[in-house]
Amino acid sequence: GSRYFSWVPTDDAPKSVDIDLKVDVQGSDRLLAYTNARFITMAGETLANGTMLVRGNVIEAIGPVDAVVIPGEAEKIDLQGNTVVPGFIDTHAHHTGHFYSSPFPETNASYLSNLAFGVTTTHDPSTNTETVFSLAELQRRGDLIGPRIFSTGAVLYGAKSNSFVEIESLDDARMHLKRLRDQGAFSVKSYNQPRRDQRQYIFQAAAELGMSVYPEGGATFYNQLTHIIDGSSGLEHNLPVAPLYDDVLSLWGAVPEVGYTQTLVVNYAGLNSEYYWYQHMPVWQHALLGKYTSQAELTARSRRVEQAADDDYFFQEVAASGKALQDRGVLVAVGAHGQLQGLGYHWEMWSMSMGGMSPEDVLRAATIDGARYLNMDGQLGSLEVGKLADFVVLEKDPLEDIRNTDSVRLVSVDGRLYDVAS
């Protein structure tokens, strides 16, 4: 992409130089036929026994096995007994290494772990700006294996600190959003800007520039309600009050396009689900996780754990409120916050189900509604003709039991197919 550098010569007005560097994206026009599988398309139907044709990185056809003609040139991949779902979308993903500067590693363990668990698109709402967009370009080209990487870049932080960003006018907001957009951001994170007019400047600048704003209010309930009223793209982290009653449900339901990423694994105002899952499963024995996460880390975090009574975990009440919002049409998405790369995303899905969401509700939040939340549903989030070939092959059916989502066998990102075992 383009980078812009400005300076002020001693004898002239400010000037800028457009430095343009273009590279080819690795790809192929090979035709693959995935057949004899159950396809949960998230486009209004589930195919009990279907075929999907993928040419290069685009879905060319999908339908029942007797309705899709497989051309002779196609390479067949028999998925007998497997279930195919759209690639999982993590709308609040903090990856290892995103806060550091170069040099960049040739591989990123958190990318591998997330991809192995079926996460094909991630959005990181707080990073080192230069680092994250450089890594995103490497992934997009095919030089770095991992999910799609999107980010806000560095946050627009309102507290006086090394990260402080001053927003005292609409022009301040425009300048900062243009700066981030020119470096690769389509979104920004408004983080604890103390005054409502400061937050409104950011929303207005974003509307002018066609950007999204995913704010975080730091568990300040009334502050977060103004985000909903004033035109944010959504809220990051849960409202610190649950259950939600009709006043808040009606307010939010009136603007359902303002989405919600609860991050139950780190929810505010009570015990979160990360501790619940460490308490209730032998994490260090998870075969797939152990391939991409060191045993030293797994042992330290999972073999000796704190315990609490099941009814003392607040995340279940928060999840129930998320379900009530989803029932009113609000875009509820899945964000795992990087708590445990890969498996943590499934913990988030399973936690949502404990608030009353059906397996189909959870999958909708993890796929098409996550894509809508990021304004990417024209290309991602469902298995439809013309969309990009991001999908997950599961050995077990998640509609029978949402806990089957981690039975990942194969994963495709942008048409590139990976065997998660290796």
Image (cartoon, rainbow, N blue to C red):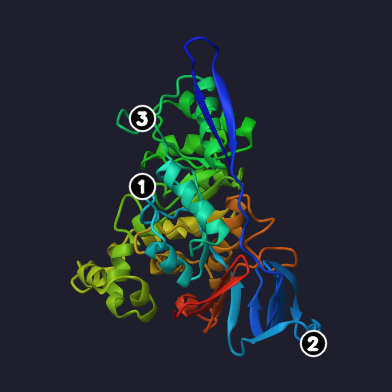
User: Quick one: label 1 or label 3, which is nearer the N terminus?
Assistant: 1
Q: Which mark is residue 99?
A: 1
Query: Which amino acid does the dot numbered 3 rest on?
Result: Phe
Q: Which residue is mark 2?
A: 66
Q: Quadrant of the C terminus?
A: bottom left
Residue at x 40% of width, y 51% of height:
242
Query: Which amino acid does the dot numbered 1 rest on?
Result: Phe
Secondary structure at badge 2 equals loop
In this view, 171 is above or below 132: above
User: Quick one: label 2 or label 1, which is nearer the N terminus?
Assistant: 2
Secondary structure at badge 1 equals loop
User: Quick one: label 3 or label 2, which is nearer the N terminus?
Assistant: 2
The Cα atoms of the two marked residues, 1 and 3, are separated by 16 Å
- Is there any visible trace of residue 329 in the rendered image? no
The Cα atoms of the two marked residues, 3 and 2, are separated by 60 Å
Q: How many callouts does the rendering have?
A: 3
In this view, 173 is above or below 391: above
